Amino acid sequence: MHRKTLAELAAALRGGEFSSVELTRSVLARIKALDGQLNSLVTLTEEQALVEAENADALLAQGRGGPLTGVPIAHKDIFCTRGVRSACGSKMLDNFIAPYDATVVERMRRAGAVMVGKANMDEFAMGSSNETSFHGAVRNPWDTSRVPGGSSGGSAAAVAAGLVPGATGTDTGGSIRQPAALCGISGLKPTYGRVSRWGMIAFASSLDQAGPMARSAEDLALMLQAMAGNDERDSTSVERAVPDYHQGLSKSLKGLRIGLPREYFGEGLDPAVAAVVEAAVEEYRRLGAEVREVSLPSNHLAIPAYYVIAPAEASSNLSRFDGVRYGHRAENPADLEDLYTRSRGEGFGPEVKRRIMVGAYALSAGYYDAYYLKAQQIRRLIRDDFLRVFEDVDVLMGPASPSTAFALGAKCDDPVQMYLSDVYTIAVNLAGVPAMSIPAGFHQGMPVGLQIIGRYFDEARLLNVAHKFQQATDWHQRLPAAFQ
Amino acid sequence: MSLGPDEVKRIAHLARLAIDEADIPSYARSLSDILDLVERMQDVDTSGVEPMAHPLDATQRLRDDEVTEPNQRELFQSIAPATEAGLYLVPRVIE
């Protein structure tokens, strides 16, 4: 069963090939047998999953099942899940049992998906390698001495190893696309505001976006269909109809105009990764697309602007963790300030502390104009770049990451080196446009991801572009040797 | 941009973060590196560029001023570190 995609599993369930209880048991058994090598899941919700699977089977028996009914999935531990620990990779929330479901969780449940567990992640989604989690590093199923990418690395590794057919992720600076690329799966970051952020533990509110991670673009379409849409509880979620993402998947790509940003193929890109991406673009030419070079001249400013905006928003968002109402609390505080500082000092790991301090500094008196305001101006320049190129092309393509997965520990002592691994993903979050990564090939046994970037709310086209490639290639169907 | 130990302590205090004395030099080094990275923004002339706070230039949506949430005090306080008589307990603030 673990070789089937989410869409294939859903169809098999509707066809009565096996029941959701059987499928869920098999998924749970596989997780228990194999996840010791990966550390991709931090909580298993076995009892609840079997109850949800029984309910799904009852619906299926009545012929009332939908496209996700009875399919097991995992949720990134950044999403609040009612009655289930929602720790966000942090000691701060290790004892936090969420009193409600995030909108994404609620919608996936309503669509019939069965939650089997919560996926490991970088602490508060801060990281590009999944090594900052309080629950320990996640390992890449293609080579367990390497990182899976972050911060949705647990979700990516679990899907790549065939432990679950799909998982949710969140992407603030590349946290869906980069781990999807390094683990060889498909992942989509929708347009900012397309999916509700309600109940998703906030990192940088103007950049955070939830999205689906799975083996194929078709799977992503099914999951996005369930997740997307306005939510009155999130005032940043947009009031805009959700199209049928499945309908246009197989549309011909003849005449599709692809732009290759010059800045995505320059210095710093591993030539082997470039070769795989170029071969994928060549495949698109064969499928009828036209390819031209374009330029995003402000791209080099994306990382500097991001490392002001994201920490500034994080320092504000994470001020709610004060040891008073929930989460970690220091013992025997002398006074209120001692309660705050020690609870936060003990509860947060070093990367989170670093970013809170950068944010506090950038927002402090005398520095606001030089840092925060400047970064917000640069953000507009970056968005204007995208608006300009999308007048001439339909999608942009390039690498999702400058290299394949690196060794565990390789960049831990140098945060700036770590930050540079998101050089091709961050501008997308600053602009708020949708983008995805799909498996495009391998280099020395490690997967390479092709990034596809689209216009605002053009997710249907991205999925179509990805699906046609996946009909012509089989990169997305491969499983790592140890997880066959 | 180079931050010294005193600045790191000041920022940690602003953020209400206790950090170990022994870790201050490494925070000073990594924060300085990050600020150097960020400093590259200063090479760009952004005069006249309107800052962008929201990717879709959306404005804040308002709703009717009505109570819509039910009282869930017991549920919410069931996960609190310390409560008494329906209130959250913190160290004494007023002597």
Image (tube, rainbow, N blue to C red):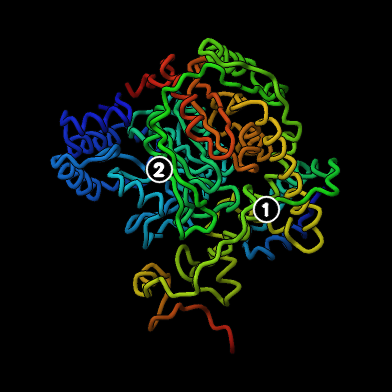
- Using a 10 Å C-alpha cutoff, classify the residue at mark 2 as few (fewer than 14 neighbours), some (14 to 19) or many (20 or more): many
Residue B6 % position (x, y): 77, 60
On the question of residue A97 being in view, the answer is no
Q: Residue A17 in the image: x percent, y percent?
A: 16, 28
Quadrant in the picture for residue A409: top right
Mark seen at residue A280 = none
Q: Identify the residue under disc 2.
A: A119
- Residue B53: where, in percent of width, then height? 67, 53
The reply, left or right, for residue A165 in relation to residue A305 is: left
Q: Which residue lies under the disc numbered 1?
A: B53
Residue at the spot x=14%, y=42% of the render?
A: A62
Disc 2/disc 1 C-alpha distance (Å): 31 Å
Q: In this view, does A301 lie above or below A318?
A: above
The residue nearer to you, when weighing A160 against A245, is A245
Type of the residue with mark 1 = Ala
Q: Is residue B6 in view?
A: yes
Quarter of the view holding residue B60: bottom right
For image coordinates 44% across by 39% down, the residue present is A243
Residue at x 49% of width, y 54% of height: A201
Relative depth, front residue between B84 and A115: A115
Is A482 located above or below residue A163 in the figure? above
